[in-house]
Image (cartoon, rainbow, N blue to C red):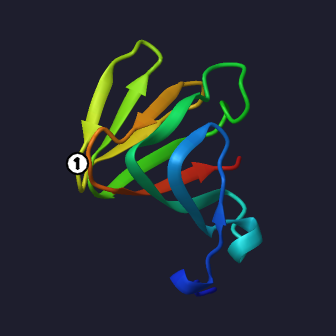
Amino acid sequence: MKIVSLSDIKPYNPPAHFDMVALKIQGEEETGLTKFWQGLSYFLPNGGANMQYQTGTFGAEFEKSYYVIDGELTVIDEKNRATVLHPGDSVAIFPNEGRRLKNNTNRVATVLVTFSTS
């Protein structure tokens, strides 16, 4: 067992993300977990992530999930279909499914991200 305190977590800059802060709370480097990593993301108003993870791109082969703790996060798929996630909502993104993320509100969106590594 390994305990991680929020005060010990360092921010990182995920590729293709903007106007947000990401904290990796679980993963190989942080705690030794090797099958997935987990992060806490704070999306500022109008913050988000560009289209990623579609077939043939970096990270496409992995499963991802987003769980909204606070605020709202809009998830847009490759066909430009948008779904708004509210607190308590989550979405599973399967391998080779592209997605964009956007906080279209004036509140910070707090999101728990889980990303498989195998």
In this orientation, which residue lies closer to the viewer: 16 or 3?
Answer: 16
| Residue ranking furthest to the top | 79
Residue 40 point in image, percent of width and height:
49, 63
Tell me the residue that label 1 is attached to. Answer: 86
The residue lying toward the viewer, choosing from 93 and 68, is 68
- Judge the density around disc 1: few (<14), some (14-19), many (≥20) Cα neighbours within 10 Å: some
| Residue 111, x across and y down, in percent | 40, 56
Q: Nearer the viewer, residue 14 or 67?
A: 14
Tell me: residue 14, above or below residue 81.
Answer: below
**Whole-percent x, y for residue 67 in the image:** 37, 53
Question: Toward the viewer: 38 or 1?
Answer: 38
Residue at (47%, 30%) from the top-left corner?
Answer: 100
Label 1 residue SS? loop
**79 on left or right of 74:** right
Q: Amino acid at mark 1?
A: His
Q: Is residue 27 above or below residue 60?
A: below
Left or right of 76, for residue 41: right
Q: Is residue 88 visible?
A: yes
- Residue 97 vertical position relative to residue 43 in the rendered view, above or below: above
Residue 42 at what x, y percent from top left? 44, 58
Residue at screen point 28% across, 30% down: 83
Q: Is residue 5 visible?
A: no
Q: Residue at x 58, y 83 (%)?
A: 4
| Residue at the image point whose x is 74% and y is 66% from the top | 28
- For the N terminus, which image quadrant? bottom right
